Image (spheres, rainbow, N blue to C red):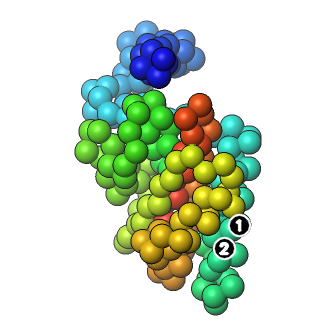
Amino acid sequence: MRRLRSVLVHLVLPVVLLAALPGCGVGGIDAIDEAFGNGGGGSPPAATMSASERTLAEQVLALVNQERTSRGIEPVAWNEPAAVAAYDHAVDMDVRDFFDHDNPDGESPGTRLAQAGVGGRGWGENIARGQADPTSVMFAWMNSPGHRANILNPSYRYLGVGVHTGVDGPWWVQDFLTP
């Protein structure tokens, strides 16, 4: 069933995107190729968080800042391009049925952030899957030394959070950035 859903998403999504592009002749195909990156391979095209997913992401940001400020660490500010990259990775993990920082094409978080136009000197990424709500995922991350280190790293000043709810999710992605 999961494989069938994945096949349908891969078949239907490009058609829907093509239909939505203005003047969807040859330019439409080129636009889809650009969305996939270098000739149509790679991750699915960018999607947008639903209002409920956005609310969950903003709750995660608030919980991160609560953890940081309770320890005297400056809060992180929301970074929209990083949030888009994080959400795209969450969707990609669902659609292509993997759970890893690097996608099946070998793209790392740094590569995905650079493709999203996010600059900076450094980044850190936390991923999780299956926790029911922001409190649960933050509890899991704060009880994992590597994830906790990202959340409490004072060098990170910005954060993008992507939350993708789905049948086998939710998928949670945090992308932290240094200026």
Tally of marks: 2
Residue occupying the point 56% across, 63% down: 140
Tag 1 near tag 2, CB within 8 Å: yes
Residue sitting at x 48%, y 35%: 94
Q: Please tell me which residue is depicted at 61% across the width and 64% down the height of the picture.
A: 138
Residue 93, relative to residue 57: is it above or below?
above
Relative placement, left or right, of 102 versus 154 is left
Q: Is residue 54 visible?
A: yes
According to the picture, the residue beneath numbered tag 2 turns out to be: 65
Residue type at mark 1 is: Ala
- Circle 1: is it few (<14), some (14-19), or many (20+) Cα within 10 Å? some
Q: Which residue is mark 1?
A: 62
Q: 121 above or below 107?
A: below
Find residue 128 and report its horizontal and vertical position in percent.
51, 53
Q: Which mark is residue 84?
A: none
Report which quarter residue 71 is drawn in.
Answer: bottom right
Front-lying residue, 44 or 9: 9
Residue at 48%, 70% (x, y): give it: 144
Residue 67, given in percent of the width and then of the height, sits at 65, 77
Q: In the rendering, at what x and y percent does residue 8 appear?
A: 47, 14
In the picture as drawn, the residue positioned furthest to the bottom comes out as 72
Three-letter amino acid code at the position of disc 2: Asn
Does residue 177 appear in this view? no
